[in-house]
């Protein structure tokens, strides 16, 4: 039994973000699945905003609220203090602030538009016996995501990572969202966003994401009878 437990669902980009941070830091953890459609009462007690993920540190508390931290950003901040190396947050003040901003841009901007418009549109209706909402997903991918891709392409500025040549929480947060879209639509168009497409292609194979993505592909194959075409 590991000291740390992640409660969540593999398809959640916020759960992916926490799993990636844990992998990067070499921290062992247990995973306990939570059905977001029917969160059990004990889970709602430890996640008062009714969201996944929540982390438990068993060395701080084995049951109930004691030892738990909800919210991927709070969890990643905690992990940085618990296991400082390798650092995922820049130490220089301005770079640190930019990393937090890009994390927020991914968690709020990318998640709200792409999470609802693509992932939920494709995955939620089939769970209720309906057809996936391919029209909404296609419209989101083609018409709503480009402004995010323009901004991220500019932020990358031809570098491999968002803040420097070092992998940070900004890369984890942005990749965690983009890899959800990649599961259905592939990377952003390399002709229009070459840096971002290359970033997604690299992140897809980075070891901190590979186990999570394999589990997601399996989950998708159980819900979608055939791949969707968003082009
Ligand atoms: N700010 C939160 C956001 C977490 C979040 O929105 N999680 C979604 C799943 S991707 C969720 O729990 N949704 C529950 C629901 O829609 O009922 C974090 O960073 O952990």
Image (tube, rainbow, N blue to C red):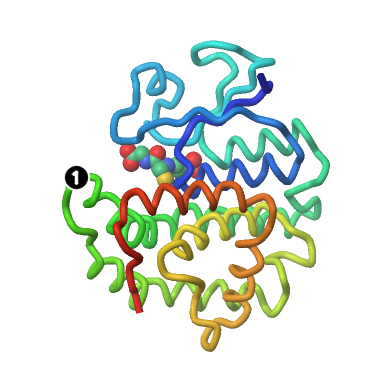
The residue at the point 25 percent across, 45 percent down is 127
| Quadrant containing the N terminus in the rendered view | top right
**Which residue is identified by label 1?**
128
Residue 165, image quadrant: bottom right
Q: Which element carries disc 1, helix, strand or loop?
A: loop
**Image mark count:** 1
Residue at position x 59%, y 12% from top? 62
Which quarter of the picture shows residue 227? Answer: bottom left
Q: Position of residue 66 (x, y in %)?
A: 56, 14
User: Mark 1 near ligand 1 (CB under 8 Å)?
Assistant: no
User: In which of the image's four quarters is ligand 1 placed?
Assistant: top left
Outermost residue on the right side: it is: 85
How crowded pointer 1 is (Cα within 10 Å; few <14, some 14-19, many 20+) is rated as: few
Q: In the picture provided, is 207 more to the left or to the right than 192?
A: right
| Residue at 56% from the left image edge and 59% from the top image edge | 174
In the rendered image, which quarter contains the C terminus? bottom left
User: What x and y, as percent, mark residue 65?
Assistant: 50, 16
Q: Nearer the viewer, residue 131 or 98?
A: 131
Residue 37 percent across, percent down from the top left: 29, 35
Above or below for 102 versus 155? above
Above or below, 226 against 20 in this view is below
**Residue at 63 percent of width and 75 percent of height:** 198
The outermost residue toward the bottom is 191
Q: Position of residue 222 (x, y in %)?
A: 35, 48
Whether residue 21 sits left or right of residue 139 in the image: it is right
């Amino acid at each position: 039994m590991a000291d740390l437990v992640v409660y969540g669902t593999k398809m959640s980009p916020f759960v992916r973000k926490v799993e990636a941070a844990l992998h990067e830091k070499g921290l062992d953890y247990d995973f306990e699945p939570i059905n977001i459609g029917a969160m059990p009462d004990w889970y709602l007690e430890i996640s008062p905003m009714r969201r996944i993920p929540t982390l438990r540190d068993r060395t701080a508390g084995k049951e109930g609220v004691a030892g738990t931290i909800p919210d991927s950003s709070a969890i990643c901040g905690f992990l940085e203090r618990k296991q400082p190396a390798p650092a995922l947050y820049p130490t220089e003040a301005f770079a640190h602030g930019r990393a937090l901003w890009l994390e927020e841009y991914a968690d709020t901007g990318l998640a709200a538009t792409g999470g609802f418009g693509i992932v939920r549109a494709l995955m939620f209706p089939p769970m209720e016996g309906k057809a996936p909402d391919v029209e909404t997903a296609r419209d989101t991918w083609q018409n709503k995501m480009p402004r995010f891709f323009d901004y991220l392409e500019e932020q990358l500025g031809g570098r491999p990572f968002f803040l420097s040549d070092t992998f940070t929480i900004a890369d984890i947060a942005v990749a965690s969202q983009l890899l959800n879209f990649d599961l259905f639509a592939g990377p952003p168009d390399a002709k229009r966003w070459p840096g971002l497409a290359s970033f997604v292609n690299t992140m897809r194979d980075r070891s901190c994401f590979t186990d999570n993505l394999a589990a997601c592909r399996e989950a998708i194959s159980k819900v979608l009878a055939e791949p969707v075409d968003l082009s």
